[in-house]
Image (tube, rainbow, N blue to C red):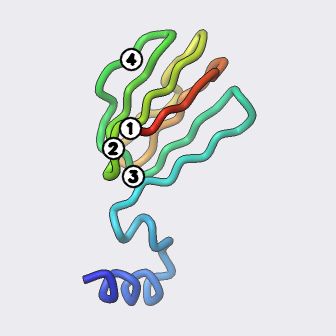
């Protein structure tokens, strides 16, 4: 199955992590977290956000956190990010 997904990624020029259903997380400084291919925002407050992914739960803790963008494929969290935990 993994071989088939790799072929699809090569053929469509899509990133392999998206074709395989894996999430991609990018942290810019301590002010912005971008997550692609998430599986939903489980709970949120200005100090803690919990996001489901294919490989576990991502917990973002900080101050003045807010959801800037939430679409089916992308989540952007802004604020003062102090800690990110994958469990």
According to the picture, the residue beneath numbered tag 1 turns out to be 87
Q: Quadrant of residue 29?
A: top right
Q: CA distance from mark 4 to mark 2?
A: 17 Å
Q: CA distance from mark 1 to mark 3?
A: 17 Å
Q: CA distance from mark 4 to mark 1?
A: 17 Å
Could you tell whether 7 is left or right of 30 in the image?
Answer: left
Q: CA distance from mark 4 to mark 3?
A: 18 Å
- 83 to 19, vertically: above or below: above
**SS for tag 3?**
loop
**Residue 44, numbered label:** 4
User: Which mark's residue is nearer the viewer, 4 or 2?
Assistant: 2
Q: Earlier in the sequence, mark 4 or mark 1?
A: 4
Q: Earlier in the sequence, mark 3 or mark 2?
A: 3
| x then y, percent, for residue 59 | 44, 28
According to the picture, the residue beneath numbered tag 2 turns out to be 56
User: Which mark's residue is nearer the viewer, 1 or 3?
Assistant: 1
- 47 to 81, vertically: above or below: above
Mark 3 neighbour class, 10 Å CA radius: few under 14, some 14 to 19, many 20 or more: many
Contact flag, marks 4 and 1 (Cβ < 8 Å)? no
- 19 to 11, vertically: above or below: above
Mark 1 neighbour class, 10 Å CA radius: few under 14, some 14 to 19, many 20 or more: few
| x then y, percent, for residue 53 | 34, 45
Closest to the observer, 33 or 59 = 59
Contact flag, marks 1 and 2 (Cβ < 8 Å)? yes
According to the picture, the residue beneath numbered tag 3 turns out to be 37
**At 61% from the left edge and 46% from the top edge, which residue is drawn?**
26
């Amino acid at each position: 199955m993994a071989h088939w997904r790799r072929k699809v990624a090569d053929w469509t020029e899509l990133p392999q992590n998206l074709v395989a259903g894996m999430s991609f997380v990018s942290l810019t400084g301590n002010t912005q977290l971008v997550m692609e291919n998430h599986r939903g925002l489980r709970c949120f407050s200005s100090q803690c956000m919990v996001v489901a992914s294919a490989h576990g739960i991502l917990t973002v803790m900080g101050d003045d956190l807010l959801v800037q963008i939430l679409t089916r494929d992308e989540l952007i969290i802004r604020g003062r990010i102090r800690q990110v935990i994958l469990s």
